[in-house]
Amino acid sequence: VAPALLGCVLAHETADGLVAVELTEVEAYSGATDPASHAYRGMTGRNAVMFGPPGYAYVYFTYGMHFCVNVVCQPAGTASAVLLRAGRVVAGESLARRRRAGRRAADAQDGTTAGALDGTLVSARDGTTADDLEVAARGARDVVTARDLARGPARLCQALAVTRAQNGADLCAPASPLRLLPGHVSLSADDIAQGSAAAGISAEGGIPADDAGRTQVKPVISTGPRVGVTAAAEVAWRFWLAGDPTVSAYRLHKRRAR
DNA sequence: AGCCAGATGTCCT
DNA sequence: GGACATCTGGCTA
């Protein structure tokens, strides 16, 4: 299920409006057999949704401040879920940016200019005055680049306003405020199998896109170890669209000092 | 690339 | 009572 979700769209409609992301990075968690899964030690109040029917959202709160959303994907009684790690905002970008504003200055290395969002060019090239740079820096501090709007599981939830309230939400009902939709690109079982088999040898060349950002060719799927996981760290159950800039950075798990 | 703080829920002893 | 978490953002080197 995890690689099949790549390219699909997660949309959330609230009183503030609609925000939707095309999923670019996911991780699979098997329940009973996976020590990295929240369900590994059995059902608790927190993980109960994972033991229910498939197609529902399992949302959990972590690190005292972040939410992450999973898609339950096995029949009731068998816990299993796919963590949605990153996506590209395809609708409601200004609302997503408002929700994410103030959290992070623009990433100066990603080749985009934060100021371009409001028509102001941010540049360190010759001819730019110190005042220009100061104004640009102040603006950048309050702006999140398009790439970073849903780059990471907690950022994705923030951009979509997914919180505890969405735990247990039906992702498949057409009328559901939080729902999953087919993407622009549908992957066949063969594509998925080949994508998995090609992991590690596929070139990270990027995906050609049209003016609307839609991919024109079948994307290459890469796989690797899951992020922030110690148990079963060797399992390559993280899947992402090769070369997509919205895929989150890999981080090794760091245990906190005692 | 690496280190660290932040905030609180969850689960284990 | 305590360890630590499917993380992010700020900072240092």
Image: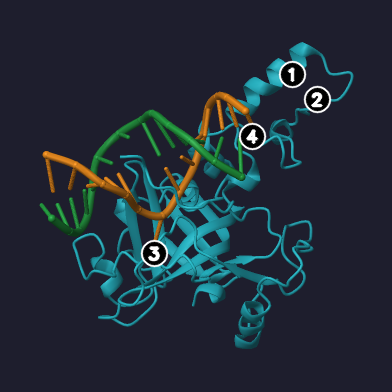
Chain colours: A cyan, B green, C orange
Q: Work out how far the residue at label 3 is from the one at label 2, CA to CA, in angstroms.
A: 44 Å
- Across and down, in percent, residue A243 comes to 71, 60
Q: Secondary structure at mark 4?
A: loop
- Across and down, in percent, residue A110 comes to 72, 42
Label pair 2/1, CB-CB below 8 angstroms: yes
Label pair 2/4, CB-CB below 8 angstroms: no
Query: Is A163 rendered above or below residue A145?
Result: below
Q: Which mark is residue A106?
A: 4
Please tell me which residue is depicted at 74% across the width and 63% down the height of the picture.
A204
Residue ranking furthest to the bottom: A190
Q: Answer with left or right where residue A235 lies relative to residue A140.
A: left
Q: Answer with left or right where residue C9 lies relative to residue A73.
A: right
Q: Secondary structure at mark 2?
A: loop
Q: Chain of mark 3?
A: A
Identity, as a three-letter code, of the amino acid under mark 2:
Ala
Callout 3 environment at 10 Å: few (<14), some (14 to 19), or many (20+)? few
Q: Work out how far the residue at label 3 is from the one at label 1, CA to CA, in angstroms.
A: 46 Å
Identity, as a three-letter code, of the amino acid under mark 1:
Leu
Please tell me which residue is depicted at 65% across the width and 78% down the height of the picture.
A195
Q: Is residue A7 visible?
A: no
> Badge 2 is on which residue?
A124
Q: Earlier in the sequence, mark 3 or mark 4?
A: 4
